[in-house]
Amino acid sequence: EDSAPVEKAVFYAAATHIHNNVNDFGFRCLATTAWAFATAKQRHARLFRSMAAAMLPAAAGANCQEMANTAWAFGTADFHDDALFQELAEQAIHRLEEFKPQEISNMLWGFATNSFFHEGFYARAGMVAQNMELQSQHLANILWAFARVRPKHPLTQQTVLALLPVCTRQLATFKPQEVSSTLLATAKAVGSGDEMTPLAPTLENFRQEVLDFFHACLPWVVARLRDFSEQSLANSVSAYAMVPVRGSETLVECAGQEVSKRLKDLDVNALVHLLKGFSLFPTSNSSVKIVKVLADIIATQLDKVRAQEMQSLGRLLNRGAAQRELDFEEIQKRLVSLAQNVQIDDTQVFPQPPGLASGVKVQQAPQVPQVP
């Protein structure tokens, strides 16, 4: 922390110098600069704008690593430049066989983070990736990228089905965030409905590759729930709502128990993501109970919810109705109603967490097995 002001001053001075002399830098230097600023979480929109303009005519001379690093850096810095991305995609599309797995993964991730979709690039990248020796991070990033930009596109569905058997074989090497990301990407691509309004699916509609992966992940996830972030927990619950293989409700019960242990320490914005995930299981008794608790806590802290999560909350609470934005008072009213009016069996409860507005109780879920 003591070095933060010095670091910021150094990056500011560098940004000013590079912006004023950007045409003196080649593509490699600018790609390295973008990577450094993104890695250090130093946002300088004016610098990235000038670098993008200078990199555009020089992209034809960039190598694979430089192109991948540029896409990754602009994605990490949350700076969109459609013209530069278009040129990078056009230059890379004919050279993807030269890319290393990390490079193709980074480039797809960077494009997807900026919601950039070039059909030819994604199609070719998906085909090339299938012939690579991909590690868990590469697999998770690639599938996340496809599902992020075009979840129901045939390209996404084809890529998911082609890579899922590899994911299943390598499951032991995955991290919790990678598993949850891959589960949700798969569910978005082949599941029924979407995250907000899943339809009632029949398992006969799912390919065996999907069923194999979801069945394999169930005991893996349940045994490691303590290692999952709140976002990963929410993603996993959402995924199993869209692809409800046998045993899904056990996962929901165990995830509900894990969430209840963390309630007093969780940021309200994390609770919004969890509410979205658990609300997709309306027929699960344990899910209904945790939904009541989450809705109650969020209602009391709604003024602390960020704009993005507030929009998500509004869509969640208004699903099935005419599409319109809910204002603050309407969202709060619906949260309180959700917390008070859901009909559930109250025979088993968790110890009640402090600070609830409506005296909600949470169901006791089964014990989470220990990791061997």
Image (cartoon, rainbow, N blue to C red):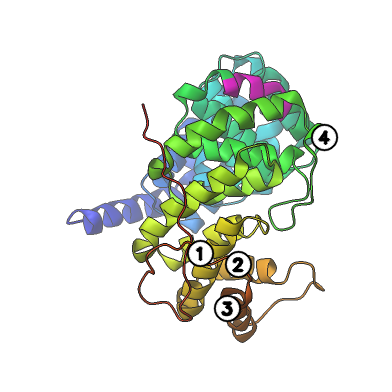
Mark 3 belongs to which amino acid?
A: Gln
Graded by Cα atoms within 10 Å as few (under 14), some (14 to 19) or many (20 or more), the crowding at tag 4 reads few
Q: Does label 1 or label 4 sit earlier along the sequence?
A: 4
Which residue appears at 72% of the width and 20% of the height? 127
Graded by Cα atoms within 10 Å as few (under 14), some (14 to 19) or many (20 or more), the crowding at tag 1 reads few
Reading the image, the residue beneath label 2 is: 344
Which residue appears at 52% of the width and 50% of the height? 253
Q: Main secondary structure of the magenta part?
A: helix
The kind of secondary structure element at disc 1 is loop
Compared with 311, 91 (above or below) is above
Reading the image, the residue beneath label 3 is: 340
Q: CA distance from mark 3 to mark 1?
A: 17 Å
Reading the image, the residue beneath label 4 is: 205
The furthest residue to the left = 2
Q: Nearer the viewer, mark 1 or mark 4?
A: 1
Reading the image, the residue beneath label 1 is: 347
Q: Nearer the viewer, mark 4 or mark 3?
A: 3
User: Does residue 95 appear in this view?
Assistant: no
The furthest residue to the front = 347
Q: CA distance from mark 1 to mark 2?
A: 9 Å
Mark 2 belongs to which amino acid?
A: Ile
The kind of secondary structure element at disc 3 is helix
The kind of secondary structure element at disc 2 is loop
